Amino acid sequence: MSYRWEFEFGTVDLTGDKIVVEAEDSYKNVFQKKYKETTEAKLGKEAEKVLKNVWDKGKRKSEGVNFLIKSELQDFFDAIAASEGITKRAITASVSEAEAYRDRDTRDDLANLFDVMIDEQIQLRMKAGEISESSVSGFLRVMNNGRKNRIWDIDLELTGGDNTDIKNKKFHILDLDPQEDWTQDYKINVKEITSPLNIEQIVNTSPEKEGEASHTFILNQEHETLFQIVLKNDSEATVTNVELIKGIASEFDKVSINNDSGGKVDKDSDKLTWRIEEIPAGASKTLEFTAKITPRDKEPINSGPIELKYLIPEDTYSGLAVDYVDGYSDNIYYVDRDERDEQPDVWDCRFIFKNRSEFPLKLLDVDLRSGDYNTEEKVVDLGPQLDPDVIVNPGEEWESQPWEVESEDLPTFGKDVQFTIVGDVINQLSALVTVEAIELPVLTLSGTKEFSQLEIPSFRKTELEATITVNTSGKAPIDKFHIEDTIPPQFEAPNSITMTVGEKDISAGNIEISYEPTASDIEDERKMIVAVTEVLDTIGVLEDETEIKIIYPLIAIKPARDTEYFAPVVFNAITQDGSTIGTEIEPEPIKVIHERRRYSDGRIIQQGSSKGQYTIIIIHKNKSDASEIDRVFEEVLPENFSLISAKPEPKKTGDKLTWTFEEIKPDEEIEIEFNIEGSGDYKAREAQKSFSS
């Protein structure tokens, strides 16, 4: 990705392997005075040297940068932008240049003013070492990066990319204003998507032990966990601009880098950032580090996600490429005709082409004919003078060699001038690979309690269902369960429950239910105590990730408005030797919602600014207790009336106007205003009619 920062003291572009600067103030004033501390803190010697080279007040300069220096400069300008309240914006990257479109005579400071980009992206999500989600797509982008001049009549022709959904590979773009772009998304159809850069992560919670890696923690025991990340380039191209961000959970501390086989590693409190400038085809890079942890609670430890980004320049997944592109901008051309002093009726003629735009222009061919261009007589073909093609930079002009014309009258010429803007063609394949974090279990229990409804109506009888789900972490010889559940007031207590462990049902004879106080005390909160015995004989040793599920019905009896009911549960598992492993579950409260519908609607018709024009205003107020969701208002234009304007903008289908509001909050008033104009035999009274809302 490439970015632009627009400061008062200058504009900075970081595009691909280049920094481009238009400085409005001196380096000394900006970086040695105003931002001295930021410069010293963020920039290394090499990055600071590059910045000094390109920062020249009143000029536009550029210089190449490698990936590591680019990362430093990006962090540096992000910090300045944050202090100034400025947001950077993404711009077209410049990763590779097609020499067919960037002529060697084009000045370096004019690079990237007119870009044509084919950017294809691979997105992969990996879970447990396998690809769980994948997509590959692309977009065409034509960008006017100039600041003054429009580009028009842009023709773009593509080749290749037969596996894309692009049917017509010829595009015509009417015009692009400065800083405007044109984009075309497309899909790429492939049977199987793989990442050219393969990633493998190994996590070992007990590296001191021989054998397979362990993924389990012991509660209250210190572990020095080993993390190993391997990147292997399985493609035939060099992978560049590699950036891997490894998240580190807050429970870990004392992170220590054991080794890395290339690149640069930056360590923050919650992440490691590993940057590698390039990985050649077939090569591998490895990062290895350790982190200490002592689990103090029963929650699984998050190993931390991984986000991997990289580029393969001058390459696409689909094989799509630019075959031809041209465009026009401000120019002027004419013929000078000078009659000789001593030879009347003999004229010395020259063709002159001036570039009045900010873009380099390439002259391709010039044909001149006498009179006008429809005549048959061809006076001169200037094409041979344009071999090789002539580049006319901004503010410059090109003058042809003179030719002689004999005529008693002032010679006139029809002109056919072929030229185009010189642009960059950029191909790149980028990838974003997200590796989901591994949940590293601690030997304990975890659970949830859910209700089939979390919101119930006031003063109504409502039936719902409670589900308690408990999962084990690690193997355990569990023999008994002891559950203390909460039955809220105004709820009938259940007479029975169903319980499963893994895929096996627990017999009702092994389940005992009691209440404190009695089950019939509906006005009070009660404890439902469930005792389950002989689990070990019935189920056996519980395996890791065994699911225990309890389901029972609940009936709310006319609860009062604006009430919340809390129903926590304590689930204890008792092992064969008498040890107890427990978990306390705090479900979301059940909320009583008091909803009564009250609305107010009004309609105003008034004359518009001109004869035959009318303004219609619709006013709607939500006086209810709850928000209105996806509220729709519809109007039909009267016969012989047309819509002039509307605020907000409606969806128009024939004569029907539709407004949809995602949410109208309680006591909120919305207003719709639209203007209509009659023509022909119209009746103004028709505008008085109100339609559905």
Image (cartoon, grey):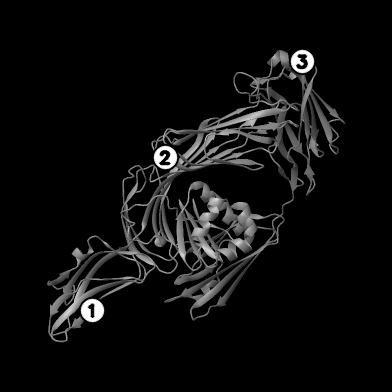
Q: Residue at x 46, y 75 (%)?
A: 678
Mark 3 → mark 2, Cα distance in angstroms:
59 Å
Mark 3 → mark 1, Cα distance in angstroms:
107 Å
Q: Residue at x 60, y 61 (%)?
A: 32
Lateral position of residue 439 relative to residue 354, left or right: right
Please name whichever residue, 302 or 147, is drawn nearer the observer in this view of the structure. Answer: 147
- Splitting the image into 4 quarters, where does residue 473 fall? top right
Residue 367 lies, in percent from the top left, at 19, 68
What SS does tag 2 mark? loop
- Tag 3–tag 1 contact (CB < 8 Å): no
Amino acid, disc 1: Asp
The answer to whether residue 165 is above or below residue 173 is above
Q: Give the quarter of the figure containing the C terminus.
A: bottom right
> Which of marks 1 and 3 precedes in the sequence?
1
Residue 544 lies, in percent from the top left, at 65, 22
Please name whichever residue, 134 or 506, is drawn nearer the observer in this view of the structure. Answer: 134
- Splitting the image into 4 quarters, where does residue 365 fall? bottom left
> Which of marks 2 and 3 precedes in the sequence?
2
- Splitting the image into 4 quarters, where does residue 31 fall? bottom right
Mark 1 → mark 2, Cα distance in angstroms:
54 Å
The residue to which callout 1 is attached is 336
The residue to which callout 2 is attached is 238
Q: How many marks?
A: 3
Crowd around label 3: few <14 · some 14–19 · many ≥20 (10 Å) = some
What SS does tag 3 mark? loop
Residue furthest to the right in view is 517
Q: Which mark is residue 576?
A: 3
Amino acid, disc 2: Thr
The answer to whether residue 628 is above or below residue 368 is above
Residue furthest to the top in view is 537
- Tag 1–tag 2 contact (CB < 8 Å): no
